[in-house]
Image (cartoon, rainbow, N blue to C red):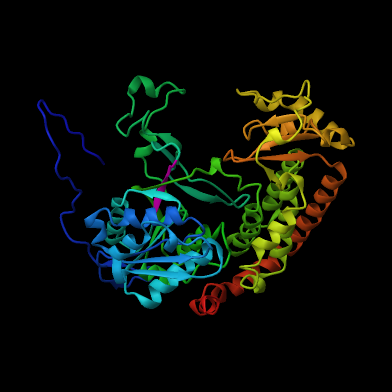
Amino acid sequence: LWFDVTAESEATISQAAWCAPSAPGPQTMPDGSIIEPSEKRVAVGIPTFNRPTDAVAALQALAEDPVVDGIIDFVLMPDQGNQHPADEPGYDEAVAHFGERFREFRQGNLGGSGGYSRIMFEALENTDSPFILYMDDDIAIEPDSILRAVQAARYAASPIIVGGQMLNLQERSQLRTTGEQVNRGDFMWGAAPHAVYDHDFAKYPLSAIGDGQSHKDPNSYDSRALHRRVDVEYNGWWMCLFPRIVAETNGQPLPLFIKWDDTEYSLRAAANGFPTVTWPGAAIWHMAWADKDDAIDWQAYFHLRNRLIVAALYHDGDAKGITRSIFKSTLKHTMCMEYSTMAIQIEAMKDFLAGPDQLFDILESSLPRIAKLRSNYSDAVIIDSADQLPAPTGAPGVPTQNIGGRLAKIKKIPWAVKGLKHLLSKEDPRHHEAPQLNLTPDEARWFTLSRVDSATVSTAGGTGVAFRKRDRDLARDLVEQTRELLSDIEDNFDEMRTEYRKALPELTSRESWRKIFE
């Protein structure tokens, strides 16, 4: 809902608000029992890791709106880095504003799940706040979104998790996504039914819903889809609010370091009768996924390991859809000379098969281990610029532009055949001295990289380049290791499912996390 104001003379809107005709009523629990409505109070948690400027900016934003400031009980900030917000200009003033409401916790780097678990732990153990709000540190926020999320949760007929939408920090008018779910075929993230990605409000405001004529045009785009309800399964923890009763019932996040912890928590909550909503109008600005390399850098280990863990917990079919999806990605990594990604994904599968008992033990040690492993591969070594290398020697006939249109897949078949033929041949070591091509991330596609023996590829953020070098024998070995592990996963998935589900209560208990924090 929104309102438009038009005026025939100069006018000023001095105050506006969405108001309910009555106070929130009692809520119905999943077991049918009734609980009293919650007060309009919230504990805001912001974990931070070596982003002191962003962390201080987030604290300052929370204090900007006096109405929002008035409902904040506590600000909880786990500091997991060695660049502390406390050393940043503006920190003392921001903390002084909150006084005893601000609490900081210095701890080792336990990842996002460790930071957010500390927030939930402290909120439940040492506050009486009826709501707990998670926020990333590297965001920009309109403080009123916090109030909107709290009010949505208070007025819900039953306790719900309220997620905020993500707006693109680099394209401020762009909405990244309206909602997501887990595809049960391959147990991978994807759009929820009727969800919209990358909607630009500057071009298509909410009121741009077209007309009868434009609706007949299949190429016409407007904002109609944003007016439809979208049912989601989870919401990212860039902004997510939990009623206290949900946190007490559901338990702590899984010790996954990063990736899939937010997804798993909502899947678990849904199993306990608490759905998640992604609430339009409650949002933050965050760097879009397209501006990160997290599908191929060190995060790829956590992507895959944690995807398998969460699948073992909630996927009731066989694992073949999952393993086929993983192997398809492996072949793409092979074509793109992303050997470090393949190597750490092999570690991810091994650690999944090792079972749940080690998850707390490797919570803090996995990242250094994976970083050390990646350093052995040229595609993981980032240099400042391609200018530090010899000029590219060229690759005549190799396509660098994508094919669009309805027949794109068919047109790429000859490229795939030529790429496969090249991948089976022995690489030319001369091309390891100088790159054949210098490519942007958009140009670094399988149909290009599978036809060369080397290339530089810029990072997604444009802060450096990696010199990728084809190694046929290494690729063959990594693919074979992957095939063997995927076969082991298929053969042992039922057993792993039993082990992880049995371990879930201990992995998510407050007492288990207390040992980590102490």
Which of the two residues, 356 or 160, is positioned nearer the viewer here? Answer: 356
Q: Is residue 180 left or right of residue 383?
A: left
Count of numbered circles on the image: 0
**Residue 428: in sight, yes or no?**
no
Q: Residue furthest left?
A: 9
Find the magenta span and give its range.
Answer: 163-169
**Which residue is pictured at 66% across the width and 56% down the height?**
301
Write the residue at 48% across / 77% down.
510
The vertical placement of 377 against 418, above or below, is: below
- Residue 237 lies, in percent from the top left, at 46, 56
Instruction: State yes or no: residue 167 in magenta.
Output: yes
Q: Main secondary structure of the magenta part?
A: strand
Place of residue 445 in the rendered image (x, y in percent of width and height, measured from the top left): 68, 33
Residue shown at 70%/62% (left/top)? Answer: 369
Q: Position of residue 226 (x, y in %)?
A: 37, 38
* Front one among 221 and 354: 354
Q: State the quadrant of the N terminus.
A: top left
- Residue 435 vs 346, above or below: the answer is above
Judge left or right: residue 392 versus residue 300. Answer: right
Q: Quadrant of residue 125?
A: bottom left
Q: 396 or 219: nearer the eye?
A: 396
Magenta span has 24? Answer: no
Left or right position of 247 against 394: left
Q: Is residue 118 left or right of residue 68?
A: right
User: Quarter of the image holding residue 95?
Assistant: bottom left
Residue 123 image point, x, y percent: 38, 71
Residue 125 visible? The answer is: yes
Of the pair 223 and 290, the residue shown nearer to us: 290
